Amino acid sequence: MPLLQAESPMSRTLSQWVDYIQTLHHREIELSLERVDQVYRRMLPAGVPFKVVSVSGTNGKGSSAELISSIFRSEGYAVAKYTSPHLVRFNERINIEGKPVSDDELLKAFERVESVRGSIPITFFEFGTLVAIECFVRAGVDLAVMEVGLGGRLDAVNILDADVSAVTSISVDHTGWLGNTVEEIAVEKAGIARRGRPCVLGMEKPPQSLIDTCAQIGAFTQIRGRDFGVKLGSNALAWGWERINEPDLIFVDLPLPFGQSGVQLDNAALAIEVVTQLANVFPVSKEALRLGLANADILGRCQILNTEPLIILDVAHNEASVAELATFVQRNSVSGKTIAVCGMLRDKEIASSLRRISHCVSEWHVATLKGERATSAKELKHILCSDLQLNDAETTPIYDYASIIQAYGAAKETLTTDDCLVVFGSFFVVGDILELLNEET
């Protein structure tokens, strides 16, 4: 790494930049705005020239950000989107007009941030956030949809003042940084709200601390079930949205987001509410709304890779998201076996998460992921046997592997056309499989 640091920034490749920015701070995560805000003010003393939507939450952030972006893009606005983590390439994090940013633009942005940073130590995510902002300014976008990486109040994305903020869902995750209860975590998520501006809450029963914190900030909360909501019709392939107590503001016969029945409707409802909150600045027609919902696309969220046999790929990695995945698997039930390929990080609530889907699974293939945070395959197998009491090797076989690629390959070999293979547990799981599929094509 010292050799890399000694190189001229102008000579670094993209992969070298990605490696380099992981060396700038001694901690991978350092929740604080002081350092990153200092660099941001040097870069853009007058602030950003575009409108901002910030999206926080435990699950559903990436899907909601894509739905919001897709709707505005369908109306013809220049829209940027910032998400994390990436699955295969860093470029995926920074999306302009529906496409990952080019290597050339990324290199220019890396050089710009580094030239301004000076000696200020910032984390990998903080540097990446500043790179995204620089790319968006250079592209002249109208609107940036910013997914919060971790928490909200002290996340790097919160250096930007959101014109509309949104909180998708809240459950227990990242307890080492955000708190041990839903009420504590909600306070951190609410930190992206701004005084006098809308904050859209995607839960029908949000934690009271979330509502109270938004009120203390002075944001105008819009709550699903109180201010807006989903209308289910007799047609299972379509749905509707309404602004409660505003009969003129209603949309019917909407396409299912991501082609999925049910599991993404909460995120879609939140996205439409965000769009309506910006209607005075960026009006959107009903036609563009429908087109945006239909065209929204995101990898690794109940992503169907194959139909016969059914192969599902999902980044679900905590209790709430695995429960959603289990619902999707049940709605797409098969006549044969349901086989799981799984790898997880050790800082997750593994037993409670796996319990949410264990009733659907007839065979397990568990694997050790890359990196120091990985739970070993042996540990996963032990959790399944001890905590979930899946001790009968004939009834529910459990196999362990050194890598997710090995587990996926072995599981695929056993499939018949009537089976379902569900691959989940981490962004690293999905990233490894997508990279494998890219190599095979």
Image (cartoon, grey):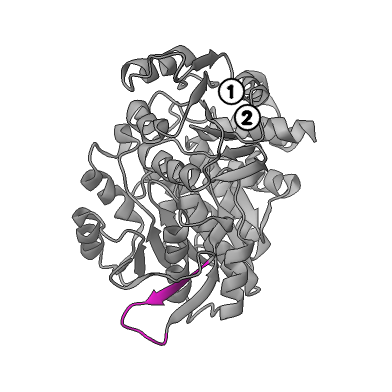
Q: Nearer the viewer, residue 39 or 80?
A: 80
State the residue lying farthest toward the bottom: 248
The stretch drawn in magenta includes residue 399: no
Q: Earlier in the sequence, mark 1 or mark 2?
A: 1
SS for callout 2? helix
Q: Nearer the viewer, residue 394 or 39?
A: 394
- Above or below residue 195? Residue 401 is above
- Above or below residue 309? Residue 302 is below
- Above or below residue 124? Residue 167 is below
Residue 432 has which mark? 2
- Which residues are the magenta region? 238-248
* Residue drawn at 46 percent across, 51 percent down: 61
State the residue lying farthest toward the front: 335
Residue 342 has which mark? none
- Above or below residue 275? Residue 340 is above
- Disc 2 residue type? Asp
